[in-house]
Amino acid sequence: MVGVVVTGAAGRMGREVVRAVSRTNGMTVVGAVDVNHVGEDAGVLAGVGPIGVVVRSDLESVLRETGAAVMVDFTAAKAAVQNIRTAIACGVRPVVGTTGIPAEELAELSRLCREQGVGGLVAPNFAIGAVLMMHFAGIAARYLPAAEIIELHHNQKLDAPSGTALKTAEIIAANRTNEAVEDRTELEKLSGARGGSLEGIRIHSVRLPGFIAHQEVIFGGLGQTLTIRHDSISRESFMPGVIMAIKKVLELKEMVYGLDKLIFA
Ligand SMILES: NC(=O)C1=CN([C@@H]2O[C@H](COP(=O)(O)OP(=O)(O)OC[C@H]3O[C@@H](n4cnc5c(N)ncnc54)[C@H](OP(=O)(O)O)[C@@H]3O)[C@@H](O)[C@H]2O)C=CC1
Ligand SMILES: O=C(O)C1=N[C@H](C(=O)O)C[C@H](O)C1
């Protein structure tokens, strides 16, 4: 039985993870950590009924007392970095969905994992459809190098652009064969109207109630456009990927970035 500690257990994604792990054979929630709802049963919060695991705020003691094999983190960037450090120090494998972690921090965490021989996985998006969207965008970029990204999320999201949009732009930049960076001067009459730019790829972030997580990658060519769109219409969409990661991280000896590395391996 794989013991899982969920950090951010009282949050939108954390509750979904508690629910998914509780319903999966061969794994069980042994600990729940959050700064909110401390003392409450994590299963009750997640809507699956009491599981006898109360939310605590002391991650290190939870990891040590429970003998967990895996920590699943959906918190916020700063908190996640600290949580991952703690997990690695305790020999517990981190599976991380939290976005906004700076590249230098990820490199350092990756080094720590390698040094300690602890497997880990960080993925900006656990929805299989989103992983495919990024993969297809990489293929399209070889033939249609001019692209812009529109990502649309719920209005409680803290980071912009989304981790998925940043990763998609990196994939497009790495795959396009000729320069697609704008070669003309634009007059931006309203600051930000053209979005943010990563290597010349414009990213536009929409935040509105009603959305969960959505992204369009639009490629433009001679007399044509190609749009690749993914919609997460429920947070359940992320759970098969999270469960896959919990199983596969047990075999890893280093930190891997992106669910694509597990799916297309
Ligand atoms: N990779 C993927 O597939 C996905 C990634 N995400 C990412 O996951 C993250 C969380 O998203 P979401 O669940 O919507 O956010 P929520 O704000 O709903 O949940 C995060 C929870 O973590 C808590 N928290 C903050 N600091 C700590 C800490 N040090 N220890 C334990 N808990 C802490 C928060 O408390 P408080 O609110 O008081 O700060 C909150 O309860 C975001 O970075 C988001 O981008 C989201 C969906 C899918
Ligand atoms: O905050 C969210 O909700 C999501 N965050 C991730 C991101 O930043 O890419 C994944 C998904 O888009 C949902």
Image: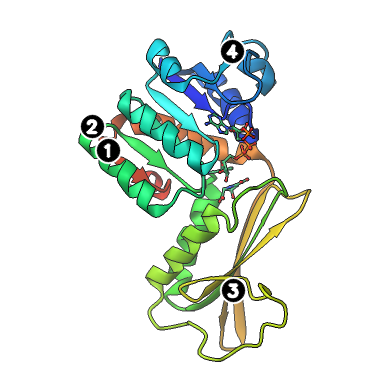
Q: Residue at x 42, y 43 (%)?
A: 122
How packed mark 2 is, by other alpha carbons closer than 10 Å (few <14, some 14-19, many 20 or more), is: some
Position of 26 compared to 221: left or right?
Answer: left
Q: Position of residue 42 (x, y in %)?
A: 62, 18
Q: Amino acid at mark 3?
A: Leu
Q: Position of residue 84 (x, y in %)?
A: 40, 34
User: Which residue is the site of mark 4?
Assistant: 54
Name the image quarter holding the N terminus: top left
User: Which residue is the site of mark 2?
Assistant: 116
Q: Residue at x 58, y 58 (%)?
A: 161
Q: Residue furthest right?
A: 209
Quick check: can you spot residue 245? Answer: no
Q: Is mark 2 within 8 Å of ligand 1?
A: no
The color scheme shown is rainbow
Give residue 177's mark: none
Secondary structure state at the residue bearing disc 3: strand
Asked whether disc 2 touches disc 1, contact meaning CB atoms under 8 Å apart, the reply is yes
User: Which residue is the site of mark 1?
Assistant: 112
User: Which residue is the site of mark 3?
Assistant: 226
- Determine the image quadrant of residue 152: bottom right
Q: In front of the other: label 2 or label 3?
A: 2
Of callouts 4 and 3, which one flags the residue occurring earlier in the amino acid sequence?
A: 4
Asked whether disc 2 touches disc 3, contact meaning CB atoms under 8 Å apart, the reply is no
